[in-house]
Amino acid sequence: MTDFASLAPLLSRVDAVIVDLDGTMVDTLGDFSEAINRMLQELALPAIEARHIEHMVGKGSEHLLRSVLKHVLALDGSAQDAIKIEARYPAAWASYQRHYLAINGQFAGVYGGVQEGMKALRARGLRLACLTNKPTDFAVPLLQAKGLDGYFEHVFGGDAFERKKPDPLPLIKTCEALGTAPARTLMLGDSSNDAQAARAAGCPVVLVTYGYNHGQPVRSVDADGFVDSLLQLA
């Protein structure tokens, strides 16, 4: 594992970069919190604090909602077994989708250094794709709203392939779309999901230190390097 000072050789050996969205380019915790709590209010369930949501982010919206339901049903004194959670899930999913699309990007902000980092990667002649576990219908409008969509040849959400990160399939498919070899395609993310997927796909991986890593120290993750800001790529 190396810090940014040793990453220049790595960047010189890649042809493309796959970039995660939540926690890497955009701080979307505010969006998650707002949409989830609107959903919970609609379902007459207790609210949940953003600090709890932060640890649930990263494995796709389906996992996020099931984790939220498990948490709030326990607060509510209701049974929280899998059957009870699944019984609540369809209404929760429909409500969440409606509320998230209504507020998408309004409570989120682009991390400092992201625009400069993306410009620097493009200036190197690297091809860029965005790969996120967020549903595509959420990801594309968010990138557009934040002025980030123009950097990417492809945007793939968590529903684009049969499996999500940390499975390697989304990275392998994204490399195919870019026409690049995994060994020459860098994964740039914020969590163990990104790192595990990259390792399994045969991609080098660099993680930002400020994102969402399920409440765990990101520097404990097996990665090829870490950056405190994407500005360090410039």
Image (cartoon, grey):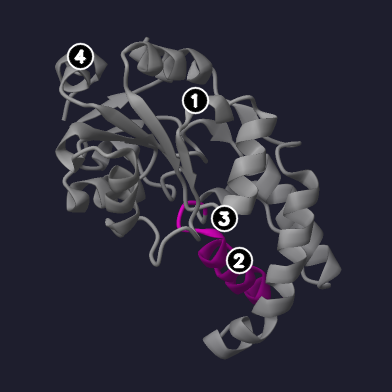
**In front of the other: label 2 or label 3?**
3
Amino acid type, residue under disc 3 in the picture: Pro
Q: Which comes sooner in the sequence, label 4 or label 3?
A: 4
Where residue 22 appears, x then y in whole percent?
52, 41
Is 59 a magenta residue? yes
Q: CA distance from mark 1 to mark 3?
A: 19 Å
Q: Which comes sooner in the sequence, label 1 or label 4?
A: 4
Amino acid type, residue under disc 1 in the picture: Tyr
Q: Secondary structure at mark 2?
A: helix
Q: Which comes sooner in the sequence, label 2 or label 1?
A: 2
**In front of the other: label 1 or label 4?**
1
Q: CA distance from mark 4 to mark 2?
A: 39 Å
The structure residue drawn at horizontal position 20% and vertical position 26%, both measured from the top left corner, is: 14
- Residue extent of the magenta highlight: 57-77
**In front of the other: label 4 or label 3?**
3
Q: Which residue carries the number 2 mark?
A: 65
Q: Which residue carries the number 1 mark?
A: 151
Q: CA distance from mark 2 to mark 1?
A: 30 Å
**In front of the other: label 2 or label 1?**
1
Residue 135's mark?
A: 3
Q: Secondary structure at mark 1?
A: helix
Is 155 a magenta residue? no
Q: Are marks 1 and 3 in contact (CB under 8 Å)?
A: no
Q: Secondary structure at mark 3?
A: loop
Q: CA distance from mark 2 to mark 3?
A: 13 Å
> Mark 4: few, some, or many residues within 10 Å (few <14, many ≥20)?
few
> Mark 3: few, some, or many residues within 10 Å (few <14, many ≥20)?
some
Q: Which comes sooner in the sequence, label 4 or label 2?
A: 4
Residue 8's mark?
A: 4
Q: Are marks 2 and 1 in contact (CB under 8 Å)?
A: no
